[in-house]
Image: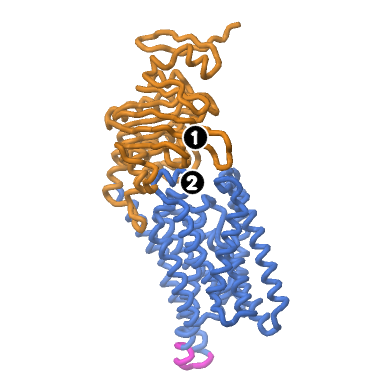
Chain colours: A blue, B orange
Amino acid sequence: MLSPLVLGWFALFWGAYGITPIMVFKVMLNAVTPFFDLGGNIPEKFIIIDIRLPRIILAGLVGSALSGAGVALQGVFRNPLVDPFILGISGGAAFGCALSVGFFPFIPIPILAFFFGIIAVILTYTVAKTQGEISRLPLVLSGVVISAFFTAMVSMVKFLVDPHKLQSIVFWLMGSFSLSDWRSVKIGGAGIIAGLLPLFLMRWRLNSISMGEEEAKTLGINVRREQMIFIGSSSLATSVAVSVSGIIGWVGLMVPHLVRMIVGPDHKDLVPLSMAGGAAFMIFTDTIARSLTDFDIPVGIITAIIGAPFFVGLMKKGGKESWGR
Amino acid sequence: MLEVKELYFRHQHAKDMILKGIKFQIDAGQITTILGPNGSGKTTLFKCIAGLWNFQKGEVLYKKQNITRLSYAQRAKIFAVVPQDHEPPFPYSVFDVVLMGRTSYVGVFSSPGKNDYEKVKEALSLVGIEHLKHIPYTKISGGERQLTLIARALAQSTPVMLLDEPTSHLDFRNQIVVLRKVKEITRERGLRVMMTLHDPNLAMLFSDEVVVINGGSVVCTGSPEVVITEDTMKKVYGIEVSLIPWKGTRVVCPRIEG
């Protein structure tokens, strides 16, 4: 009776990974261009192996981190309108990164990013939590407030730091994969996988957790503890993603929504498919970002251009359903 | 047997006790209804027994085992709680909602297995809502939602079921449909069921024992015919009622003249 569900899940899973041939095709296509200019095999190989490949892998990792964190946070906060960016995690992590680049080069960037990312989400949570349960609109608003605060802190760092470092902070904040190399793939990969693994393994429990604190408790969940695991892991994945690629917003909001529309709200399927979908989406958008014009447009700009109207559309369409209590 | 012994509860920083030494017990295959006016401590009592609020004094015992000390997962294998009708943030299918009842049996790092799906199917057919299983929980009627939550409690395979005002958002027909189902399942599975109700007539029709509480204390306990009298109704609700005998039971009718 349930095999169609399972089969459907698998079919969709492979479908989402169907981006792989396109990705390979793209690499090939891009590799052909320098072939005409230089007429040699060596630069082509160099571009694929040392520039394109790490960039694509990193884009995939960051996409699945943001989207996986987004779907988990939406479940934990019972709020379809949140993602790591809206909750202020990205902003907090960005401040951590700027601080590390500007003043504390001896502390590894991802560590400071994670530290401030988790502080930001705790602040957002505390501000939004008035009595018992957290309602949806206050959570989004408090996220906006905390994000604004950390953006100001980043500006402060930018103002105080020396001009050389300023340039790299500004460029990196726009959200781009143009500086990807194998080193960032290793750092990003380790941190992102460490953050996503608990989300993946505990995904089914998000169904019960999303029913609300009291109900989840009576279903046998230690809500406080598991909320912390989900929020902590999401923050880790997001912060590491921010530390290797800057702020790329909206992915964690859009991809889970699109996937939910296709496969339904069951987190057992939704979480892995969002991760896969996020990877595919990010690789796709980044490919557009770097091949649309002669310049390498930061991908964060593209996702924001798509994301903002998407959010508006959700608000309008969902109406009371999205905002609720 | 489920025993509630001398429960005392007050909110943090609050002076007054909300529950003042509540005690009663429930036997297998029996429905016990907590009846009382708004503010009598009915909801508080429910939350204390369900393990959501910590009471200051007293014990909840199941087969002599103290429930208060158990973890959430252990408690979820003894008590199944049917909450009031509500709207979840995501449109889970009825099947997925019932499957949540298996949470305490599924490992933290795994997903439900074959046995869990079997239990869900069994619960759906016992409640008689198999036809709804693929429909989003947000798209069904209030009565169907309540039945879904009851099926979820059954999938939890517990000896005790607690229902929080199962009829509060339902129309006349669905109140009867839901409570009839609860009674049927209680008998069939030998469950110990505790529910809170507002309507003395429904309490009269569907319970084996009634615990009337007011001001945080038990006013009286016993079979509905013994407990629901003109005197108690006057004492607890402050209104005059007449009890009209009808086919072996009695109907509570408020006097509205004059």
Q: Residues within 10 Å of mark 2 (few under 14, many from 20)?
A: some
User: Does residue A161 appear in this view?
Assistant: yes
How many labels, in total?
2
The disc labelled 1 sits on which kind of residue?
Answer: Thr
Residue B232 sits above or below residue B5 on the image: above
Which is closer to the viewer, label 2 or label 1? 1
The answer to whether dots 2 and 1 both sit on one chain is no
Host chain of mark 1: B
The residue closer to the viewer here, B187 or A268, is B187
User: Which amino acid is tagged 2?
Assistant: Gly
Give the labeled residue for mark 1.
B44
Under circle 1, the secondary element is helix
Left or right, B184 with reference to A56: left
Would you identify the image quadrant in which residue A142 lies?
Answer: bottom right
Residue A159 highlighted magenta (yes or no): no
- In x, y percent, where is residue B140? 45, 36
State the CA–CA distance, disc 2 to disc 1: 18 Å
Over which residues does the magenta segment extend? A37-45
The residue furthest top is B258
Left or right placement of residue A169 versus residue B232 in this view? right
- The residue carrying pointer 1 sits among few (fewer than 14), some (14 to 19) or many (20 or more) residues within 10 Å by Cα, namely many
Name the residue: 51% across, 30% down: B41
Name the dominant secondary structure of the magenta segment.
helix
Return the x and y of residue A183 as percentages of the image width and height: 48, 82
In the rendered view, tell whether residue B58 sits above or below residue A82.
Answer: above
Residue A212, numbered circle: 2
**Is residue A3 at all visible to an observer of this figure?**
no
